[in-house]
Amino acid sequence: MSVESIAIFESSLDEVGVECVRTTADGFESALAPLLDDPAVGAPLPFDGVSLPDAVNTDPTVAELEAAATGVTAAGYGIADYGSVVIQGGAAGEEPVSLYADEHVAVVAADDVLPDMDAAFDRLGADVRDGAGQSIIATGPSATADMGALVKGAHGPMDVTVVLVEDR
């Protein structure tokens, strides 16, 4: 983990309107709790010592997904100079369903914050060669100005928070 990359990541997140919450694996659940609006859905987290609380439904029905206020996903990595997170789908092509809620909480390990887009493309290339499924590079809340004025949440979450786990 580069201290400089983390500082740039936090600054870039702030520039795109994303709150960054730093925590340790031991403090994860207490850091996550105030970020969850019910009902919450999520994808299981791949980090050692970090898991979602029971309040987050990891196997939602379509109706539960449509009703979800908060979605929690693991980010494979962050991109410091853009404040972006890379959300990876499974090898079978499934998308992380928690991206559809109005509030998105992305969980990323501090060790997985890359300095720039070149490093991210190198990692994406390695992921593809290793048979990984799709990846989504997300930067801030969803927004579009296709029809004139800027509209948030048109194609995804209106609010995004990144939880940075420093010791996974």
Image: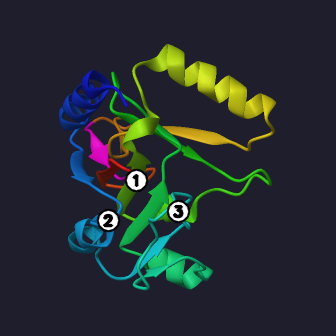
Q: Secondary structure at mark 1?
A: strand
Q: Secondary structure at mark 2?
A: helix
Left or right for 76, reference 39: right
Looking at the rendered image, the disc whose residue lies closer to the viewer, 2 or 1, is 2
The residue closer to the viewer here, 34 or 24, is 24
The residue closer to the viewer here, 106 or 66, is 106
Query: Relative to 116, is 47 above or below?
Result: below
Residue 13 percent coordinates (x, y): 25, 36
**Amino acid residing under circle 3:** Leu
> Magenta stretch: residue 86 in it?
no
**Amino acid residing under circle 2:** Phe
Residue at image point 22% right, 28% down: 7
Q: Which mark is residue 106?
A: 1
Left or right for 80, reference 150: right
Residue at image point 73% right, 44% down: 133
Residue 78 percent coordinates (x, y): 42, 35
What is the basis of the colouring in this image? Answer: rainbow
Q: Which residue is mark 3?
A: 45
Is disc 1 surrounded by few (<14), some (14 to 19) or many (20+) residues within 10 Å? many
Location of residue 127 (image quadrant): top right
